[in-house]
Amino acid sequence: MKTTVFKDKHEAMGAKMVDFAGYYMPVQFEGVNVEHQTVREAVGVFDVSHMGEIWVEGPKAYELVQKVSSNDIAVLSQGKVQYTCFPNDKGGIVDDFLVYHFSREKYLLVVNASNIEKDWNWLVKQNEGVGAQLSNASDETSLLAVQGPLALKAMQKLTDEPIEDMPFYTFKVLEFAGVKDVLLSTTGYTGAGGCEIYIPNESGPEIYDAILEAGEEFGIKPVGLAARDTLRLEMGFCLYGNDINDETSPIEASMGWLTKFTDGNDFINRDYLEKQKQEGVSRKLIGFELLDKGIARQHYPIKDAQGQTIGEVTSGTMSPSLKKAIGMGYVKKPFAKSGTDIFIEIRGKLVKAQVVKRPFYKG
């Protein structure tokens, strides 16, 4: 297993450590519910250094990123971030990722930990005949996500650059906690506000200490990956490997909004996805709430009132904020409308649920 530079700190703080995507990561510290509510109400800090960072640079950078991304990077200006995905050539998704726009000749792609090698190989393959400059900075980069309504207020203490009013999905390069050229962005995966701080590994431990100290008056706590999952699921955000994968199209996954069929945006497999959008798909990713007792888990069958299988659960949990069981999954299109009754098969028993609009948590 790979480790992050914060391993010793996590263990000293009593974290329960697990193997996550080949990394030795903290799954929880005090407990999922406490950590979850801390992020919803105050501020928490996550180690997400397992995420991958790939730079695309040079005169052909724009051409390559536009080719591999389903979204349209033509709308980006310096300091903006965009959520998008790599469509594969079979109608599925190689990965979902973030694009940081520095200039038309410099982009940072932030990809999922489990897909770093796959994404790198995909980019190298697609770059043949294009000629952009690619570099994988994943192993040299540490990443902390400071999330919660008080996050930016707390982090403002560590930089002279104004950050409290930064719009969603933007970034700045600044001096932070005495370290120069730190990348700070406001994307978030929790729906609670906050920022992400990209730092060179050697500066990681000192910045982590500075963050905990700056956040102390605001009740900051270290948060593990278990609460990160409950937070993202309350917002209805997709998790690669659960809700989207190589066999799910962005149209099926209700991600048509990041699949832009604009002039000049000739991304991989555009024609197939455009046809899907025009003609419709046979299944859709939905959100649901359980009306009866039980918790839905990945791969549980979704059935209709007659017990016929109509789909499968992709993510499920007991929502700490809503105090009810929620989940996501793919169902046949006629069952995808909000308000439709469905049933989750849990240990041989059909448990009633209802299709609801996402996000589950409205704040």
Image: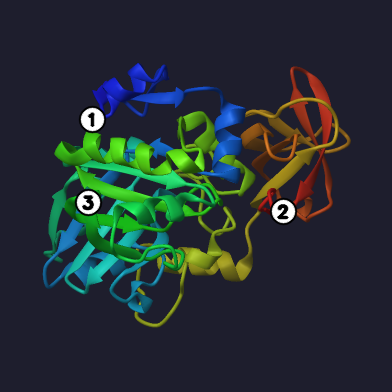
Q: What residue is disc 2 on?
A: 333
Tell me the amino acid under the disc marked 3: Ile
Tell me the amino acid under the disc marked 2: Lys
Report the Cα–Cα distance between label 2 and label 3: 37 Å
| Sequence-first disc among 1 and 3 | 1
* Residue drawn at the location 39% of the way across and 64% of the way down: 82
Q: What residue is disc 3 on?
A: 54
Q: What residue is disc 1 on?
A: 5
Where is 226 relative to 232, above or below? above
Q: Nearer the viewer, residue 351 or 55?
A: 55
Q: Can you give x and y, in whole percent of width and height, for residue 290 in the image?
A: 79, 36
Q: Is residue 149 left or right of residue 180?
A: right
Find the residue positioned furthest to the right.
306
Marks 2 and 1 in Cβ contact (< 8 Å): no
Q: Which of 217 and 173 is in front in this view?
A: 217
Q: Quadrant of residue 329?
A: top right
Specify few, some or many for label 3: CA neighbours under 10 Å numbering under 14, 14-19, or 20 or more: many
Is residue 168 something one can see in this rendering?
yes
